[in-house]
């Protein structure tokens, strides 16, 4: 991140949720927090306070959250992370297509939200002359020279495998929808065929994952898309109990 | 003329037959009605028949009198048959008599006179009359039979459409409007259907198209059994309503009210008789389609829908918002150094998180159950990797599985499956949760995913309490919980029911195998493999 502190705008009508979000962001360090309790105040703050990150609740009293999302997106590229009680997959895809950078489903832990926020900020502040190497666990992807190192050994990928990894790496830590991936990798004629994407992901996992059956880098977001995990802890946090066969 | 009397009776008989075939657009005529009334009603067909005879005469005159004499009766048969096939018996008789008269006048000597000198000519003409009347009658009978066949076919079509519409009705008011549409369609009159609710009231007509008096009468008819039919004359508008109750065995399902109109007495009498006949048929139809059952189901569905909407809309939001605040606050506490370094505080915060997640899972189950109750689990089928589904299900239940040794095994070369991954993941999670609940801590749960015979088999085996044959039979029921565990293991009994419904919606099945009490259980989800489209040129593996 290029700034020492980032301004986070919280738009949520529940004071108790705002309270813990503020505490979480401030405790983590590197964030200053501005709160808005409804869509009107949120839009005003998004215009005048120039936040670096917006956390947007979808259930607001005065306006639908999706409208607020679209309004902000009509003039700003600021990273937006959506909070929703709805775990419906189509809804998630719709939000991502409407311009949300990522989503978190309530109830959630603060660590999850902060990890997503940092990933979104990293992408937002990335300048062209910065180091173009994305590191994800043992994997490092040089987006300019198009080389991929796995535990410091260069690996060979097919053009489509590299393209998939490239798109995910340029959104490292963030979810990328199936449609977006299909669009980036294939020509229009087969764009709607998700089967190709599944097979390509399976092939890529065979190469980059230590155990392709239990991927820890290239994560499936069921019904939505894929995510390249930037750190291992995020994945294993919930599943540390697993003992693999 | 002596001939006139039998002919007039023929006319009268024909006219009633005609009314029966032709329906309400013809004015009514009873036996013994004055002739002019009949002529008025049938003016068009009669005139057309005469015109046909005229045309035949002109044709014959043009050919000239040199044509052979036996051509005359044959040519005159043409207008008779045409009249019979188009307008029925009466027109055919009229055409036959006119033809005989015209033949006599123009073509039998002495010409231009109705006198007949030659006895052979008399025989000729009489023979012609007999042949014309018989063939006319035959042709008109054919016509009426075709007509009634066509009508029967149309009725069947109506009935078919009606029963299909009934099947798609979601609410009682949908159902009533379907019945009204059907009745209006078959009767050709504005029709209202009053539905009798279980508390012996009736569903009020919202449109206001039905006079209050008729509504009140219908209401009293829905309350009393055995009051079959009634006719009401609305004094204000002079219009007549016909009411008939639809009953089966001992319940009244509703009352049909038909607006007959405000025509003259005779017209009303005729349409009443016709409508009575159709109504009898219609109420039979309604009984046959088990309208009572459909009504009940629609009402139930409506209630279900309301409950589900309430739960999905507000309740789940209201329940989940405080949970989100608790869960979030606990997670912030957990990350605070002062709590992190204090084992006691840390474990308390962890307990809060665990319980919130359990509660959230329970709300999720209820949401799923309401989805299932409304029986509209609509799967969104998409190609998915079974490994992703299994891994996600295990990750989602990691808290419930924490005390067990979970072993995961995947076959090499697993096929893709075409399923709604959210539904299969939830079903798999429910089975995992059950495995963990009903087996001792520290025991092994084996999750094995393999392909066989074009199917994907995902089995979850535990070393737990097993299932007795008795319990097996009850397994698919909602809220079934075995008596053995009701006191010791918490649960709602919804889990397996949700799992089996979701898997059914994905065109798969669940198999439960258990050696019996204490022998462990293996639950297997069986799903069809996705058909891979082989398209090498565009495939993912090129280059």
Image (cartoon, coloured by chain):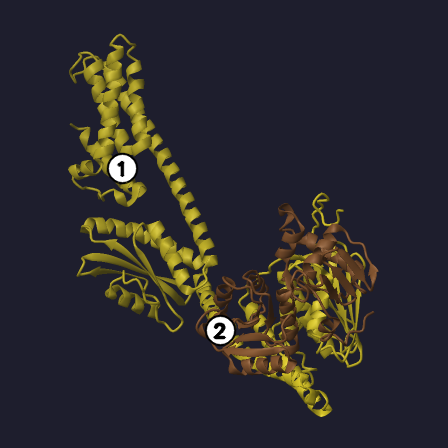
Chain colours: A brown, B yellow
Residue B417 in view (yes/no):
yes
Q: Nearer the viewer, residue B405 or B197?
A: B405
Q: Chain of mark 1?
A: B
Mark 1 — residue? B14
Instruction: Tell me what residue is drawn at x 25 percent, y 54 percent.
Output: B260
Mark in front: 2 vs 1: 2
Marks 2/1: CA distance?
89 Å
In percent of width and height, residue A164 lies at 70, 56
Instruction: Tell me what residue is drawn at x 27 percent, y 45 percent.
Output: B24
Left or right: residue B87 versus residue B429 is left
Left or right: residue B66 versus residue A140 is left
The reply to whether discs 2 and 1 touch (Cβ–Cβ < 8 Å) is no
Vertical side of B112 occupied by B449: above or below:
below
Instruction: Tell me what residue is drawn at x 81 percent, y 65 percent.
Output: A210
Left or right: residue A154 versus residue B537 is right
In percent of width and height, residue A50 lies at 52, 71
For the N terminus of chain B, give its image quadrant.
Answer: top left
Q: Which mark is residue A45?
A: 2
Q: Secondary structure at mark 1?
A: helix
- Mark 2 nearby-residue class (10 Å; few <14, some 14–19, many ≥20): some
Q: Nearer the viewer, residue A220 or A48?
A: A48
Q: Which mark is residue B242?
A: none
């Amino acid at each position: 991140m290029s700034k020492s502190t980032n301004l986070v705008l919280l738009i949520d009508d529940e004071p108790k949720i705002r309270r813990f979000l503020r505490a979480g962001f401030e405790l983590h360090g590197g964030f200053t927090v501005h709160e808005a309790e409804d869509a009107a105040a949120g839009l005003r703050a998004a215009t005048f306070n120039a936040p670096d990150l917006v956390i947007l609740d979808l259930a607001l009293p005065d306006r639908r959250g999706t409208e607020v999302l679209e309004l902000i997106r009509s003039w700003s590229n600021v990273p937006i992370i959506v909070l929703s009680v709805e775990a419906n997959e189509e809804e998630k895809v719709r939000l991502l297509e409407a311009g949300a950078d990522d989503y978190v489903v309530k109830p959630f832990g603060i660590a999850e939200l902060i990890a997503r926020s940092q990933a979104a900020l990293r992408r937002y502040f990335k300048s062209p002359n910065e180091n173009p190497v994305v590191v994800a666990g043992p994997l490092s992807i040089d987006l300019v020279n198009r080389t991929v190192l796995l535990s410091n050994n260069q690996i060979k990928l097919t053009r489509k495998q590299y393209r998939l990894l490239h798109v995910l790496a340029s959104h490292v830590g963030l979810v990328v929808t199936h449609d977006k991936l299909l669009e980036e990798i294939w020509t229009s004629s087969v764009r709607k065929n998700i089967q190709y994407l599944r097979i390509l992901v399976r092939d890529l996992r065979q190469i980059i994952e230590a155990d392709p059956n239990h991927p820890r880098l290239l994560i499936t977001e069921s019904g939505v898309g894929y995510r390249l995990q930037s750190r291992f802890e995020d994945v294993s946090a919930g599943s540390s109990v697993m003992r693999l066969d | 003329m002596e001939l006139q009397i039998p002919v007039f009776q023929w006319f009268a008989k024909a006219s009633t037959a005609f009314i029966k075939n032709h329906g309400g657009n013809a004015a009514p005529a009873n036996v013994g009605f004055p002739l002019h009334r009949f002529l008025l009603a049938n003016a068009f067909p009669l005139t057309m028949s005469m015109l046909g005879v005229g045309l035949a005469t002109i044709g014959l005159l043009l050919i000239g009198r040199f044509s052979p004499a036996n051509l005359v009766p044959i040519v005159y048969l043409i207008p008779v048959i045409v009249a019979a096939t188009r307008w029925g018996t009466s027109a055919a008789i009229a055409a036959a008599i006119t033809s005989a008269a015209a033949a006599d006048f123009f073509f039998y000597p002495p010409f231009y006179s109705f006198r007949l000198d030659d006895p052979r000519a008399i025989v000729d003409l009489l023979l012609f009359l007999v042949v014309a009347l018989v063939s006319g009658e035959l042709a008109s009978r054919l016509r009426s039979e075709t007509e009634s066949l066509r009508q029967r076919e149309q009725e069947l079509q109506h009935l078919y459409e009606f029963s299909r519409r009934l099947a798609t009705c979601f609410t009682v008011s949908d159902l009533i409007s379907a019945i009204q549409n059907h009745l209006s369609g078959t009767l050709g009159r504005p029709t209202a259907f009053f539905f009798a609710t279980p508390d012996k009231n009736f569903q009020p007509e919202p449109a206001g198209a039905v006079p209050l008096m008729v509504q009140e009468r219908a209401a009293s008819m829905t309350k009393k059994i055995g009051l079959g039919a009634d006719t009401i004359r609305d004094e204000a508008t002079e219009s007549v309503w016909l009411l008939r109750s639809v009953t089966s065995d001992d319940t009244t399902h509703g009352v049909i009210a038909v607006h007959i109109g405000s025509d003259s007495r005779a017209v009303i009498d005729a349409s009443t008789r016709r409508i009575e006949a159709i109504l009898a048929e219609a109420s039979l139809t309604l009984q046959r389609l088990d309208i009572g059952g459909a009504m009940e189901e629609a009402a139930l569905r409506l209630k279900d829908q309301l409950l589900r909407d309430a739960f999905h809309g507000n309740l789940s939001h209201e329940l989940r918002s405080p949970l989100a605040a608790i869960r979030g606050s606990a997670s912030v506490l957990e990350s605070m150094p002062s709590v992190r370094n204090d084992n006691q505080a840390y474990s308390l915060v962890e307990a809060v998180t665990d319980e919130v997640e359990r509660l959230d899972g329970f709300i999720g189950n209820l949401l799923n159950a309401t989805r299932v109750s409304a029986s509209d689990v609509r799967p969104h089928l998409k190609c998915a990797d079974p490994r992703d589904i299994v891994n996600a299900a295990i990750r989602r239940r990691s808290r419930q599985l924490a005390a067990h040794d979970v072993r995961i095994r995947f076959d090499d070369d697993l096929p893709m499956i075409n399923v709604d991954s959210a539904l299969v993941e939830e079903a798999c999670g429910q089975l995992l949760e059950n495995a963990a609940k009903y087996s001792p801590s520290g025991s092994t749960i084996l999750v094995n995913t393999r392909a066989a015979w074009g199917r994907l088999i995902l089995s979850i085996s535990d070393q737990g309490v097993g299932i007795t044959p008795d319990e097996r039979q009850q397994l698919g029921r909602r809220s079934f919980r075995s008596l053995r565990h009701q006191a010791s293991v918490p649960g709602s009994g919804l889990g397996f029911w949700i799992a089996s419904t979701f898997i059914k919606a994905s065109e798969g099945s669940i198999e439960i195998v258990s050696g019996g009490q204490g022998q462990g259980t293996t639950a297997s989800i069986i799903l069809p493999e996705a058909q891979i489209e082989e398209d090498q040129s565009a495939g993912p593996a090129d280059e």
